[in-house]
Image (spheres, rainbow, N blue to C red):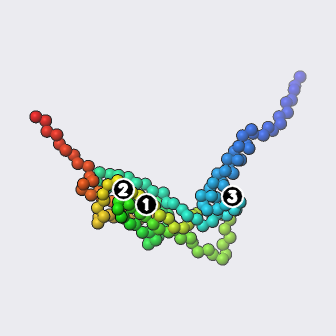
């Protein structure tokens, strides 16, 4: 005797949770980009470029991701051991023939400030900009550099 078992699709118990999780992610993403929860498009918003700050024996090195930003739209200042990077990512001119279905890139002005723990030689700070990465080299002042003291054993 052959018995056939008919299987009925059982909805996943986790589907409501994953759907809710996706909805929360979307709302958070829109909020961070300056939109609202019921907004179907993203607004031009404030953005914050990613930054790496590294300390070496002779200098500090700051790298800032600035894709789409002209070097002429970036200003760097150093005052009272505070490095400030200020700039603007400008939105491209819209074409009359373009119909955007989704806009996710952020535009607007930004400012990042970092307090350095030791003195820096202000007159020898160097900055370079290549492939959307701003690199700032901040040489340490002599009194801030680590000193090695040789211990003589008798």
Quadrant in the picture for the N terminus: top right
Asked if residue 82 shows in the view, the reply is: yes
Q: Is residue 47 left or right of residue 30?
A: left
Asked if residue 130 shows in the view, the reply is: no
Distance from the alpha carbon under mark 1 to that under mark 3 = 30 Å
Q: Is residue 144 left or right of residue 69?
A: left
Q: Secondary structure at mark 2?
A: loop
Q: Earlier in the sequence, mark 1 or mark 3?
A: 3
The residue at which mark 3 appears reads as: 37
**Which residue is located at x 40 percent, y 66 percent?**
76
Q: Quadrant of residue 114?
A: bottom left
Quadrant in the picture for the C terminus: top left
Residue most extreme to the bottom: 96
Residue 51 tag number: none
Which residue is more in the foreground, 7 or 121? 121
Q: Quadrant of residue 122?
A: bottom left
**Spot occupied by residue 152 in the image (x, y as percentages of width and height):** 13, 39
**Which residue is located at x 70 percent, y 47 percent?**
20
The residue at which mark 1 appears reads as: 113
**Spot occupied by residue 119 in the image (x, y as percentages of width and height):** 30, 57
């Amino acid at each position: 005797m052959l018995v056939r078992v008919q299987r009925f699709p059982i909805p996943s118990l986790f589907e409501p949770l994953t759907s809710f999780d996706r909805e929360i992610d979307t709302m958070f993403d829109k909020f961070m980009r300056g939109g609202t929860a019921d907004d179907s498009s993203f607004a031009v918003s404030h953005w914050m470029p990613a930054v790496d700050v590294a300390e070496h024996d002779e200098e500090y090195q700051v790298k800032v991701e600035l894709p789409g930003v002209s070097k002429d739209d970036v200003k760097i200042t150093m005052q009272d051991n505070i490095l400030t990077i200020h700039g603007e990512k400008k939105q491209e001119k819209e074409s009359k023939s373009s119909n955007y279905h989704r806009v996710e890139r952020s535009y607007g002005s930004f400012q990042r400030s970092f307090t350095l723990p030791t003195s820096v030689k202000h007159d020898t700070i160097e900055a370079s900009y290549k492939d959307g990465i701003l690199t700032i080299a901040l040489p340490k002042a002599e009194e801030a550099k680590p000193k090695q003291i040789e211990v003589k054993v008798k």
